[in-house]
Amino acid sequence: YRSDKMVPEFHRMLYATDLSADSIEAIRYAIKFATEHKANLMVLHVINQRLIAFSKIRSTLFNETPKYKIIQEESDVALKRMENLIKIVCKKDSKNHRADIKNVEHLVVNYGRIAEEIAEKANRWGCELIILGPRRKRLLGWIFLPSISRKVIRRTDKPVHIIKLPKGENQ
């Protein structure tokens, strides 16, 4: 703990993003939060293995692209999207107080079960805090599927900070 405040000291944080439209504000918040705590930020996107499984079934039926190529293509697209989000944040913030992107240590794209990957990477990389961006679900998603946030909280002993955007923003 810092002596001047009762705030835990963080050296490395993990921000997990779904790369949705809400991600711009969420990544800006995560970068600012990491900067305020003088912590490095690992930015992670997990490609859901269920989506790849569906693509694999489709590709098998129609004799298309093999699974490893689908994963590589999805990873490349996600990494480009992450880089673009960072650029957008920098461009928007250049007029005001520029986002301090030097705290962004790595941009990583992984494949697997989302909650498990987030918890496992936070442990492996020595992150003391997990930051989750907002994720909008449709009505049936809220009723039938447990949220990624709840799954991550159940799978880690690390504190989890969930970003909630103000009402009306990118809904």
Image (cartoon, rainbow, N blue to C red):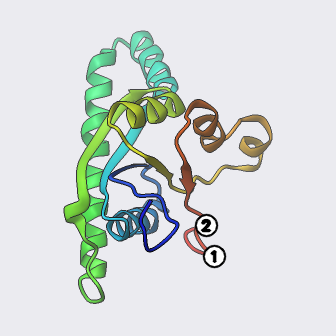
- Quadrant showing the N terminus: bottom left
Q: Nearer the viewer, residue 149 or 169?
A: 149
Q: Is residue 65 visible?
A: no
Q: Is residue 89 left or right of residue 141?
A: left
Give the numbered dot on residue 18: none
Q: Nearer the viewer, residue 76 or 36?
A: 36
| Residue type marked 1 | Gly
State the separation of the CA atoms marked 2 and 1.
6 Å
Q: Secondary structure at mark 2?
A: loop
Q: Nearer the viewer, residue 5 or 138?
A: 5
* Residue tagged 1: 168
Q: Is residue 145 left or right of residue 101?
A: right
Check the image and name the residue furthest to the left: 102
Check the image and name the residue furthest to the bottom: 95
| Residue type marked 2 | Gln
| Coordinates of residue 166 in the picture (x, y in percent) | 61, 74
What residue is rendered at 47% in x and 58% in y? Answer: 8
* Residue tagged 2: 171
Check the image and name the residue furthest to the front: 3
Q: Secondary structure at mark 1?
A: loop
Q: Is residue 120 left or right of residue 94?
A: right
